[in-house]
Structure formats: structure tokens, C-alpha cells
Image: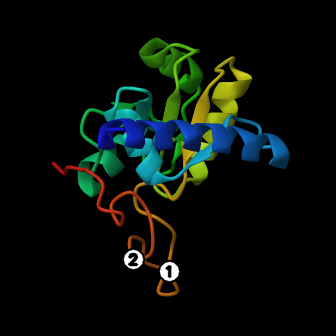
Amino acid sequence: MTVELEERTAAQQALEDARAAALAAGTPYAGGVAPEAAWALFAAGDAVLVDVRTAEERKFVGYVPESLHVPWATGTSLTRNPRFVRELEAKTGKDAVVLLLCRSGNRSAQAAEAATKGGFTQVFNVLEGFEGDLDEGQHRGGSNGWRFRGLPWAQD
């Protein structure tokens, strides 16, 4: 088995594991996947990666190249985007494998739940988010998250 095929198989297994864990926990969407699995699925073309952070976060903090952008909330006050589900559907379709990414995994979990209620069938939350959890010093990026794990990202 080639390395590429092994990575794809591991990523697909991660989706199956996420679905099973979500079902067992009563999670209201398909489940959560680790950043590395999300990257493998996205890079292989097996999933669509959608950044749900604000445009300002993407611009000033960074983003995953080739990812789509549908904000869950907008502006510095994080006003909920009432068109989120419609915008997501227009960019991905309701049956695509959709991986939602935010700063820490919290907003993307809310967005995944809303998308599932809106008829999406395969929406997953990218665990840890782009920046990761806050540490004891109230800083992000030192213990987990997309960037911490060394996955591809860019900054304007």
C-alpha cells in the first residue's frame, strides 16, 4: 500500500470514528476530526474545508490556502450570520463532506449543528480550530490547533 493510500485510508477511518463517537455522545452533527485528519481529507479532495471565522480573523491571523470562507458570525461583535446555512449550501452542497474550521473549535461546532439542522448530512467540526485552546497565560497556539500542528497555512 502506498503512503498516499495509507493516509487516505487513515483519514477515512477518522471520519468513521468521528461519526461513531458523535452518535455515542449524542452530538448533533456528524462529529469532530483532528486537524491532521482534516488536512489529509482536504488535501486528497475527499472533503471541503470551510473556514467559519470572520474575514478579519482570516486576514490578520491566517487561513488555510484553498479553503472556502463562510462566516458563522461577522465583525468584532461576532454578530451571527443569518444566511450561514444558505451560503454554505451555495458553496458546498448539502451532501458534501464538509469540515468546518474556526479559531478553537467552538464556533465551528455551533455552525456544524446549524448546518445539520439545515439538512446537511456530512458536516464535521475540526477539533482544536486554527489557533487552538487558551493556555494558562491566556494565549493560543502553544498547545494545539491547526497552526501548532504545522499544517499548511498562509497570511496576508
Q: State the residue at coordinates (27%, 52%).
A: 62
Q: Secondary structure at mark 1?
A: loop
**Type of residue at label 1?**
Asp
Pointer 2 with pointer 1, Cβ within 8 A: yes
Residue drawn at (48%, 80%), measured in percent from left and top? 138
Instruction: Work out which residue is located at the far left of the displayed protein and give it.
Output: 156
Q: How many marks?
A: 2
**Which label was assigned to residue 135?**
1
Query: Image check: 74 left or right of 147?
Result: right
Where is residue 64 shown, x and y percent of the image?
A: 29, 44
Where residue 130 appears, as percent x and y from the top left, is 40, 55
| Between 128 and 140, the one nearer to me in the picture | 128
Q: Earlier in the sequence, mark 2 or mark 1?
A: 1
Q: Residue 144, relative to residue 94: is it above or below?
A: below
**Residue under circle 2?**
142
Q: Is residue 81 above or below residue 108?
A: above
Instruction: Calculate the distance from the C-alpha at mark 2 to the C-alpha at mark 1.
Output: 7 Å
Looking at the image, can residue 140 be seen? yes
Q: Residues within 10 Å of mark 1 (few under 14, many from 20)?
A: few
The image quarter containing residue 40 is top left
The amino acid pointed to by label 2 is: Gly
The correct choice, above or below, for 117 with respect to 14 in the image is: above
SS under mark 2? loop
At x 58% / y 15%, what residue is drawn?
94
